[in-house]
Every structure is written in C-alpha cells, then in structure tokens.
Image (cartoon, grey):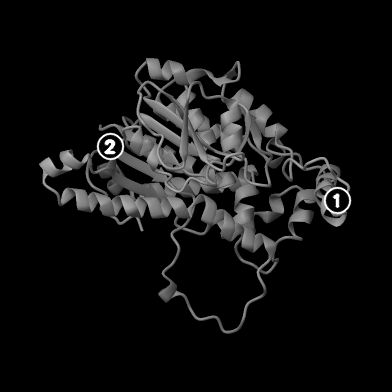
Amino acid sequence: MERQALVLAGGGARAAYQVGCLRAIARRVPEYRPKILTGVSAGAINAAHLASFRGNWLDSVEALSALWLALDTEKVFRTEARHLLLNMWHSALPLVSGGRFGKKRLRGMVDTEPLRQYLESALHIENGNLKGVRQNIEDGLLDSLAIITTNYETGRSTAWIESKVERDLGRGQVRVERGRIGLAHVMASSALPLFFPAVAVGNAWHGDGGIRLTAPLSPALHLGASRILAVSPRMRPPDPASLPALPELPVYPSPGQIGGVLMNAVFLDALDFDALQMSRINRLVEALPEESQKEVGLRPVEVMVLRPSCDLGALARRNEFRLPRAFRFFEKGLTNSHAKSSDVLSMVIFEPEFLRELIDLGERDTAARGDEIEAFLRGEACSVPVW
C-alpha cells in the first residue's frame, strides 16, 4: 500500500462513529495500517490511542472500541448538581456585578478531571507521554502522529508532531512543535471551547484544535501522505433545493441550536471545504504533463471522506434521557424541547448506549461502501465526489 494517512476530525462524543468505521475497515482490509495519523478535538483521542497501541491494527481498533464503550458521562466530566450550580454562579457573578465580583476566572463549564484520569490509564501514559508512539515509530509501524491544538494566546493552530521524518509544516496559520506527544496535548486538543477547560501546554493555554484549523487535511499532506482517508462525524447536508418549504415561521432558535450551528462551522465545515478543494486541485494536476507537475512541485493526493448516513443530532435527541439528571435539567434550559435534532447534545452524551449506537452506525455505513472503500485503500481513485 502507498504511504497513507488517516485524518480523524472532532465532534466530542460523535468521534465514537469513527471507531465503527475503523472496525469495519480493519476486518475487510486487515493489511491496512496508515503510516500517518492526525487527530483534532475528540479525534485526537482516537489518533493517540491508535498511534501508541502495541499490537496489530485490528487489535488496536478493538481496544479503542472498548475504551469508548467503557465510558459514561461521569468519567468525562463532573455532573453533580452542586458542582454545576457553582460553575454557573462563577460565570454569572462577574457579568451581573460589572466585573467587581467573581474575579476568579471560570475554566470551562465542567470539570474534566475524570476524563484526564481515565485517559491516563487507557492510553498507557508514562512520564506524561504516550508510551507506545516512539516504539511504533522505531519498529516502522508508524511514520508520524500529529495532534492539533489552538493556542489561545496567539490565536494560531499548533501541530504537535512526533515523527521520524523532518518535513516543513510551518506554513500559514499552523505552528509546528516537534517532540514527544503526551496526555496534555490530547486533553488540550479535545477541550471543547467554553464547555471544557483549556489546558496548559508549555507556556501557553491551549484548547480545541478545530477552532482555527482552516485546512484539516494539510498536516497529513505536508507529512508526506500520498492518500488520505478522513472520517467526519457529520451527515452530508441535504441539497437546499430538495428541502420542503416551511409552512410558517418556526420557533425562535434556542441557544443550543445556535451553538450547534457554531460547533459544526468550527469543527466540520472546514474539513468538507478542504476535501473539496483538494479534489479540484487533483483534477487540475492530473491534467498537467508529468514534467510540469515536477516543475511546479505538485502531486495528486487522493482523498476519501467517510460520514454518517443519518443525522447524529436526531440520534442524540432520542438518547437525551440517558444523561445524568442534574446535567439534563440545566441542558433543557438551553435547548428547544420541540427540536427533533440537537448537534450540541450529540457532542456531550457519553453514555455507553449512545456510543454503542454510533459505533454500530459507523460499521454499517462503512460496510455499505465496502467495495468502494477497499478499492480506494488499494490504490484506486475515489469514485464518489467528496461533496
């Protein structure tokens, strides 16, 4: 196989969908093992696990599935009513007092210390670093791992890279930091803005890697990927022309509905646009003579994007009752109870039943495209447009 890359996007709990996709692929194409792994937001957890696991690819994917299925909301953030009320009070006090009171800054709406403790055990952390990554690189099983964060001081994306190759990624808005990757990088990349607290990495505070990453495929591209498989936890938006006209003005959008649109714009729209642009560039490059391609330093890089066949927000709405009672009480104040879908909910429901549904959906969707995906991984061009 060529030097392939696996790009795992963000989306909180929705990243469990990626696990189902990878399980189906590992069973159908057992020799598939990407040499380049990049992770953003919750996708950083999946990328970190796969890069550090000591064993064959199928076993690593099965272990990742077990990691997700052993989760519940209380292993991700504290859900006690007292703690949630205290955080709400700390966030509201500076606002209602004009900044005279409440000088202590709120570090996220929830406390993610339970997630840090869980990942410290599940990812086999040693001295703060991912133990198996360096060993897999030395054994030739992995070329590069890249975890993306956002530096809140500079407003730029930072690509933390552990790799055996020296390649230039310092272009545009992405700053490159080479060295060992550890738990702090994974926690920072998966820190949903405002909801999860930022994490100190080095001498700066870092948060979710999807905030400023306008070209999610670029780290894999500059690390030398010849073929990129990306998994997006977002259903392809329907054609506006196919949508029925609304009979009347709907209910005013709730903060949760607006937040869902913002989250999609931050985490997932950029991947769709980047894949579309790369597909267009590929067609242009292929139209050039081979000598001209070498002269301008361009090469075609095929991209395939896997995505859910149904709305994960609607699936989350049906699983809302699984949330802890105290968290569900406060969540209802931010969402529209009449809405059939909630993108924000789909990012924060870490209950095993919901995660199992996402994993099963990923397996079914991938199996349905099995022939096409296998052909792509074995070297054929992507036969279905990325958009």
Q: Is residue 91 above or below residue 169?
A: below
Which dot marks residue 93? 1
Relative to 312, say whether 179 is above or below. Answer: above
Left or right relative to 191: residue 58:
left
Q: Quadrant of residue 105?
A: top right
The residue lying toward the viewer, choosing from 370 and 142, is: 142
Q: Is residue 307 visible?
A: no
Quadrant placement of the N terminus: top left
Residue 188 sits above or below residue 376 on the image: above
Question: In this image, 359 relative to 107: left or right?
Answer: left
Amino acid on which disc 1 is placed = Leu
Task: Tell me if 228 is positioned left or right of 187 in this view.
Answer: left
Q: Position of residue 346 (x, y in %)?
A: 60, 52
Residue of label 2 = 226
Tag nearer the camera, 2 or 1: 1
Position of residue 352 in the picture relative to residue 178 (left or right): right
Relative depth, front residue between 99 and 272: 99
Task: Determine the residue positioned at 69% across, 39% down.
Answer: 197
Q: Quadrant of residue 333?
A: bottom right
SS at badge 1: helix
